[in-house]
Each structure stands twice: as C-alpha cells, then as structure tokens.
Amino acid sequence: MEDFFLRALGGGIGAALAAGPVGCFVIWRRMAYFGTALAHAVLLGIALGFLLDIEPILAVFAICFLLAGCLVLLERQRYTSVDALLGVLAHAVFAAGLVVVAFMERMRVDLIGYLFGDILSVGAFDLALIFGTAAVVTAVLSWQWRNLLAMAVNQDLAAVEGVPVERIRLLLLFLLAAVIAVGMKIVGMLLVVALVIIPAAAARRMVTTPEQMAVAATAIGVVSVIVGLFVSLEWDIPAGPGIVLAASLAFAGSLLIPVRGRSRRDG
Amino acid sequence: MDLAVRAGEIVTLVGLNGAGKSTLIRVILGIMKPDDGAVIQAPGLRIGYSPQHVHRDPILPMTVRRFLTLGAPSPRKKLEEVLDEVGADPILGYPLAEISGGEMQRVLLARALLREPNLLVLDEPLAGVDVTSQSELYQLISDIRDRHGCGVLLVSHDLHLVMAATDTVVCLNRHVCCTGRPQTVLRDPEFISLFGPHLSETLAVYQHSHDHRHDALGEPLRTHDAASDGDFHRQG
C-alpha cells in the first residue's frame, strides 16, 4: 500500500476515535446544530491561517474555540433562542470566511479540499495533530465521564449533586470544537458533522448502556473510515463522501435491529 | 422570606401554580441565584434531591442501575438494598425509559438516598403516581425521615396527603402566606381564600389568626406587626 493511503487510513481512524464518544453526547444533548455552527467557522479559520501565515488547522482550532466561547456567553441572554443564535453565528462566521477568502488568489484552488475534505493529503503533522487530539479528547472524556453523563440525564439533578454544570458544558463544547477541527481535514467542513453524528446514531439500537454506545459509535466510525477509503480506492470515488456513505449505510442497517421491549433482566 | 427545615422535620410547600414553589426550591438548591438575599447552607449539609420531572429520553441508553450510580457510585448490593427500602421491585437492569411513573419516583428517591443526605428535597414526589400508591409513598417518606433522621422539604399540591404526613406547612403565594402546623394553616383565611372554603372545611381542625392581608394584586398588607405566635413568618 502506498504511504499516502496508510496516512489517510491513520488520519481517518484517529478522527473517528475522537468523534465517536463526543458524537454520543452531541446526540444525547441534542447539540447537532452546535456542531454545524462550529463547522461553518472552519472556513474563516483556514482563511485567517493563510492570511496570517500560520498552520491553517491550528487557526481552525482557535476560531472554533472562540466561537464555542461566544456561544456560551450569548446563550445567557434570553431574547434569542439558542437555535436562532446558532443560525446567526454560523452564517456570520461563514460569510466572514468567504469575504477573507475573496482577498486571496491562491485559496480559491484549495477551497474544494477544505469544503469536501482531502484525506489523501494527510501529512505527518496532520497525523500527529489528529492522534494528539483523539488522545486529549478521550482522556478528558474519561476524566469527566460521570459528570457529563449526569448532566446529559438531568442538569438540575447533576447541579445539586455537585457537578459544575457551566464548566462541563463549556468543556463539552470545546471537545466538539476540537473534533470538528480535525474531522474537517478528513471529510471536509460540509460533511464533518456527519462524522460526529452518524456513527453515534447508528450505535443506539445496538446497546443498553451509555458506555457501550460510546464504544459502538467509535467502532462504527472506524469501520466506516476503512470501508469508505477502500471503496474510494477501488471505484475511484471521493474518499470523504465514501466514508460518510459507509456510516450512513451502517445507520440504515441499524434501523433493522428490533427495539427491545421491557424485559426482566439482571443489571 | 424566611424558611427553616430542621433535622427530622417534614416541611411541605403548598401553593397554586405560579406561587413560586419551584423557584424557591431552585434557589434553595443553588440551581438559581436569588435576585436578592442569600441562601446559607449549614456546613456538612448533604442534599438529596428528587426533581419534579426527569425526562427519560430513549435516545440515551440508561439502565436503572446506571442512573442510580450517577449520583453516588455504589456497589450492587447497596443499590439493591436502597431499591428495596423505597419499595421498588428489583429493576436494576431495566431501561430507565421503560419503568412506570410510580417506579420512577421511587428510583429518584433511591438516588437521593444513596447520597446519605441530611436534607431531602422532593419536588412533587407524587406526580405520576396512581392514587393507591400515593399514600404508600407518603408513608415511605415519613418512614425514611424516621430512619435517617433527615429533614425533608416537600413540594406538593395534594393537600389531603400533605395534611396527613407533614409537620409544618408553608403556604406560598409569591411570598410566605402562612406557615405552621397543618391544622393551623388550614383555618388561615389566606389559605381558605387560596384554596376555597370547601377544602379547608373538609380538612380543618381548629382556628388560628394571621398577621397580614392581601391587596387586590396579591401583595401582602400588614394588619398588625409583631406576630407573637411563632408560626408566623417575617416578610422580607
């Protein structure tokens, strides 16, 4: 196998490792639109990266974290609903990204790669960043797992039981921002939310505990990356969409799994 | 307003919708910050809380066992004991989304108890519980108080049961209207004007006086200042 293909495989698997468990929380807490808003910020990050001559993916991290912070602050005001707020911010940052891009001649060529992902161009630096992110995300999730889960079930109950609700919310948003930033390299900003949501959605019917769901989502993501990449190599289709389609097929297949009714079982 | 819950005492908040019961509870629990004033918790206070409604979302796979351990990690044996104590069937392995409303109230109580609280805060613990189980559940709360010696702060609008198993009733109508032993509060003219004379008559035992009236907007008006009876609150 060619080196570039192995790096692509590694990068895709790394992104899936980070996206699986975070995706579960995105689904449980109904934060899909947060992911979409963060993905819209990717373009501005890349453009600023080129403009200021810093590594684009690092600029994407910075912009996503900034947006996550803005969201948390703006959520406190009560005269705009959260979904409207997300719509405003997502499109404002996207428009800003387009404006900055318009100033730069050489960006136009690369734009397609960032919109739809360019997994076959994953380099050594990207690989290190992706696996570093996956490691940090997994470590933070394990460390705060019970708090995150308690909040996903009931925020008031968690708060009374001593969970620092505000901080954990921000933490989850930062984790999501990090996953979006690295996932963007794999499937592009238009499809990156799919990498987060679809494996977790596909996992739901296969499991009975939240921990199982996180593991299953990760596994489905990894398998989708492998299948998608090999299919794209075999049939010469674009890799990012191939991966997303593979995950979508897993979701469609999961719909065939019967939902278990109430049954007496041992805990 | 001024509100105290002593160890081993059951205090019930009653009041119509919009009276501020849930807001008061949320402020006491620290979920909401008061606009004015302070909530001072005794050092070492451990609160066990059972919210009015926990949305059980099938999107999140969650067994009763996992739900119970979210508040305080506990070995299986302890979980079984506490489920038994609250009178629930051995349902540790059940999906949370599929147990009945009555079972859920017991599971919430169990989760609160696992934290070994010295104050139990129960918001509408009878919601979704069928009538026959309601008095049973009330008896259970009273038993738990006796066994654990904890203070219990209840929110309820089921007045029959409130009167039967409460030490102190606090009647809210955007301020503390009247407070005292159940029989006393029942004859309070404010209580009667809130809940209607019929209910009070069926539940009442004897008479008591009160320290303020309400104007047309429901704001309290002082009729005489120093309430000598310890049952009364100070508005503030």
Image: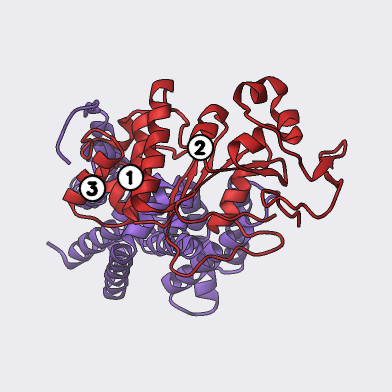
- Viewer-side residue, A157 vs A260: A157
Would you say residue B31 is visible in this rendering? Answer: no
State the SS at label 1.
helix
Residue at point 27%, 29% (across, down): A255
Q: Position of residue B86 (x, y in %)?
A: 31, 39
Give whichever of discs 1 and 3 has the lower sequence position: 3
Residue at point 62%, 54% (across, down): B3
Q: Taking A252 as reference, is A217 above or below it? A: below
Question: Which part of the image, by quadrant, shows the C terminus of chain B?
Answer: bottom right
State the SS at label 2.
loop
**A221 lies left or right of B129:** left
Residue at point 63%, 27% (across, down): B204
Q: Are marks 1 and 3 in contact (CB under 8 Å)?
A: yes
Report the Cα–Cα distance between label 3 and label 2: 23 Å
Q: Amino acid at mark 3?
A: Leu
For the residue carrying disc 2, how many other residues have a C-alpha within 10 Å: few (<14), some (14-19), or many (20+)?
some
Disc 3 and disc 2 on one polypeptide chain: yes
For the residue carrying disc 1, how many other residues have a C-alpha within 10 Å: few (<14), some (14-19), or many (20+)?
many
Disc number for residue B79? 3
Name the residue tied to disc 2. Answer: B124
Question: Which part of the image, by quadrant, shows the N terminus of chain B?
Answer: bottom right
Name the residue tied to disc 1. Answer: B110
Q: Amino acid at mark 2?
A: Glu
Report the Cα–Cα distance between label 1 and label 3: 8 Å
Q: Taking B65 as reference, is A5 above or below it? A: below
